[in-house]
Image: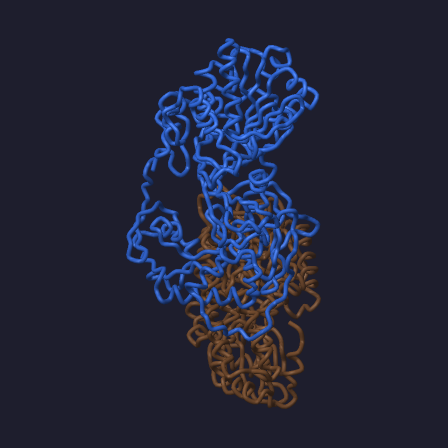
Amino acid sequence: MPGIPPLNMPTLTIDGQSVAVPGGTTIIQAADQLGITIPRYCYHPGLTVAGNCRICLVEVEKAPKLQIACYAPVAEGMVVHTDSERTLQARQEVLEFLLINHPLDCPVCDQAGECELQNYYMDHGLYDARFREQKVKKRKAVPLGPTVMLDQERCILCSRCVRFTDEISKTGEFGIFNRGDRAEVDVYPGTILDNKYSGNVVDICPVGALTDRDFRFKARVWYLSSSPSVCPGCSRGCNIDIHYVLDRPYLANGARVMRLKPRYNPEVNQWWMCDEGRYGYKAIDEARLVQPVSRRDGVTHPLTWDLSMAELVQLVQEAQARNQLSQWGVIPSPHLTNEELFLIRRVLQERLGITCDGRVPEQAGYADEFLITADKSPNRRGMQALDLAGPGDGAKPLVERALAGELRVLYVFGHDLVALYGMAMAQQVAQQVFLIYQGSNENGTSRLAHLVLPGTVYAEKDGTFTNCQGRVQRIVKAFEPLKGSRADGEILLELARRLGDPLPCAPSAEIFSAIGETVPAFRGLRYETLGPYGAPLVTEAVPT
Amino acid sequence: MAFEPVLSRRFGNAEGTWYDAYVADGGYAAAKRVLTSMTPAQVTEAVTASNLRGLGGAGFPTGKKWSFIPKDSPKPRYLVVNADEGEPGTFKDRYLLERDPHAVIEGMLIAAYAIGSHKAYVYVRGEYVEPYRRFTRAVEEARRHGWVGRQVQGAWDWDIVIHRGAGAYICGEETALLTSLEGGKGFPRLKPPFPAISGLFGCPTIVNNVETLACLPPIIQRGAEWFAGLGTARQGGTRLFSLCGHVARPGVYEAPAGVTLRQLIETHAGGIRDGRQLKAVIPGGISAKILTAQEIDVAMDFDSLLAAGTMAGSAGVIVMDETTCIVKALWTAAKFFAHESCGQCSPCREGTGWVFKILQRILRGEGHPRDLDVLLSVAGNMEGKTICVFADAAAWPVQSYISKFRGEFDHHIREGRCDLAGNPAVEHADAHH
């Protein structure tokens, strides 16, 4: 750990294990450091302490009452028991209280399977109900806004959602209304929950009170697999987990990805992500390109991958023979990984001498002071560090050159010229040049291009993105590319192979190591050294 | 020697003791003395020596509480007056605010000077419309006569803000009061920090009860030793006892802190009404543990009642005669606590409602042999496990009523009815909570 060691480092004992922590640390934090998990509902490390759920009561020697671990600070010589009879008894009591008015509608509750009431009850339940009275009735299935559904009967009033909208999104929609066992969470009268970060309240709700309207009833959570990744929705690079289902095609019309969840990274997004990123996953399974296509004189011909690669290779070899590769242009995409961009640089720029220039007139999007950035691509810093963002010498961007008749072939990765330039200009480009489109999803350009090579989405590949802070972060392949599509790196490697000049590296780890050996900004970086939270580019100061 | 009232001497002025009458009776002389000839430390010393204890119910030594204000904080300090008198069975602050409001204002000025506060907030129970009206009038009088505002006695700037509560019992808990005063929902706060360190708006704050403050002018006027001598070894002065229930003369009675419960009931309040027999007494507001008729030879000071297994609390004495159904009495208390729990902590939010529903069912004649054990268990599970002492206050009646009158509860459960004549408990219990 960096920094000056604090002078005040009390040593305490938790369940017989000794630990020294900085003064002011709470018992629950110290226990977390030891890997001892004290149950929690209201406590969340990203929010202020409320201390209301009482599930974290622990026995502290010499203290007459049990202490809430989320609030009680450690002290020198303190002896804490998180598994003593008194502690376990208190936990069971609190669970009993929390459940007497709970509807126990687990079979129809979306939270079932990831519910902390269920989880803790398995360990500390009473299993012998003593409550013989009528439960309190409250409102159920209340839409709070476009993203979140509220069930007041399931709510345990932990106030995490209230604190999130007060402290993190700073939008203040939530409040607790009424008193006693009639208390209920709701949005203030006349407001709806509709802010840029609303989905996070579902993540932090420890029970089924707040559920995600997008995910609701799509799949039981025990069918979900999870794979760590990085959100490609903007240049922040929030760390995420992709939750997907491969073996139940009858769910969600066969879509594989069911939802995204933020993954903790103290350097980037802490525990949070924005709604735009959270609900941006649909492009993974919708409107995908799954068939290489050749288009001549307005007629479209499906191609096998073998034929499409043969056509590409033939184009390159003819141009080489006529010395026309200088009249080629490649527009790389900041949606590609560092590894893919490096292969573009190696194969197309360095070996074939083709101009690679990522400049296109992209509009800045919505941005805020928290997570959302104006640049809606995940890897512009990587593209810049790999010298593919465009020359600094004021040369004309490639599309302008194409329109001026200076190019014969334009090889576009991912971008949609129709969206960027308008249909008329894009059509003009397609008339001036042989247009190659390589990308994962249908767009205006894929419908104009003379050769279409279906690429993959981030969930289908290994690699790294470099976020706006210059932090290099791993993405992990969650599942295979859709049948008919092909990883962008493999397309480039195959091209190199067919041109008789194969690259020695194939797996992304090796490509990344090669980047570390050749590109100054990445010097010394390897997958093994990135760690769970990524690592900054080395040659420039990283703003934090 | 006849008892000489300290706090209630002007209570005969049913329409209020206004400025001229208060000054004619020696009013504001103590404040003048404090502001012109005493240091704040000397005032605190005198209060400490007087053995004055917090009369809102907790009985914490007032001088000691004041001493917790940090000496070196750059933040403003606030005096907050807890006039949110809501403890069932307690109505003594109401008398002070209505009949002797200047005594409270003078006490506030002395306290504000002692703790270095230039702004005092008075949080008045929402239902206390007349006390609010009269106290507001008194503050305006005091302002006109130079006791509130700038350069009071050439020595002290201060101002008073009066705020009316919105009807929540929990706002009498000092940290909930502060949150409410700040505009938030009346939720008690985690402690520490205590208000003296971080209270209103995060600043050092002293919260004192109305009656506590009204004791200050006499302490300054007649001396700490005199005041201490009125009470017991560890509790100086007198106390205003609110007596209600089945006594001949309900009302507020001032007596030395060490008066016995029997004296209060039999002498001050004229005994049990209609010649009936005493059955039980709650000595310190509805939260206090109940005493049986055999247990009333106890002194009413904080320490004696603690030793007797109950508490002096707010000195609200609720007297029940032999016609009282103790199950229904507990049901009434439980209804109150279920209604007033702020709902923040799980054990209190759920436990108060559960206890009430069980009692409701017993009164309906649908009791179950296991109910009393569940009631005691639920009460025990609430006690000492929450942010504030509300849950404890809700648990104590359950524990004490059942342990002292178990036979009556058993009978209700077994027979499904109340055998006390003229006590249609079942019908009453049908009322919605």
Which chain's colour is brown? Answer: B
Would you place residue B404 above or below residue A365 in this image? below
Residue placed most toward the observer, A279 or B290: A279
Rendering coords of residue A88 (x, y %): 39, 65
Q: Quadrant of the C terminus of chain B?
A: bottom right
* Residue A163 position in % (x across, y down): 55, 49
* Vertical position of residue B38 compared to residue B324: above or below: above
Depth order, front residue of B413/A460? A460
Task: State whether residue B120 appears in this view.
Answer: no
Residue A13 shows in the view: yes
Give the number of marks. 0
Say which residue appears at 40% left-offset and 64% top-offset.
A65
Q: How is the image coloured?
A: by chain
User: Could you say where residue A371 lies in the image, as x and y percent from the top left?
Assistant: 54, 36
Residue B223 relative to residue B32: left or right: left
Q: How far across and how far down the image is residue A309, in percent?
A: 50, 25
Which residue lies at the image location 31% right of the left edge and 48% below the top edge?
A10
| Above or below, B31 relative to A348 | below
Q: Is residue A345 above or below residue A114?
A: above
Please name whichever residue, B18 or A407, is drawn nearer the observer in this view of the structure.
A407
Answer with the quarter of the image where residue B87 lies. Answer: bottom right
> Chain A rendered in what hue?
blue
> In this rendering, would A124 be left or right of B318?
left
Q: Nearer the viewer, residue B211 or A135?
A: A135
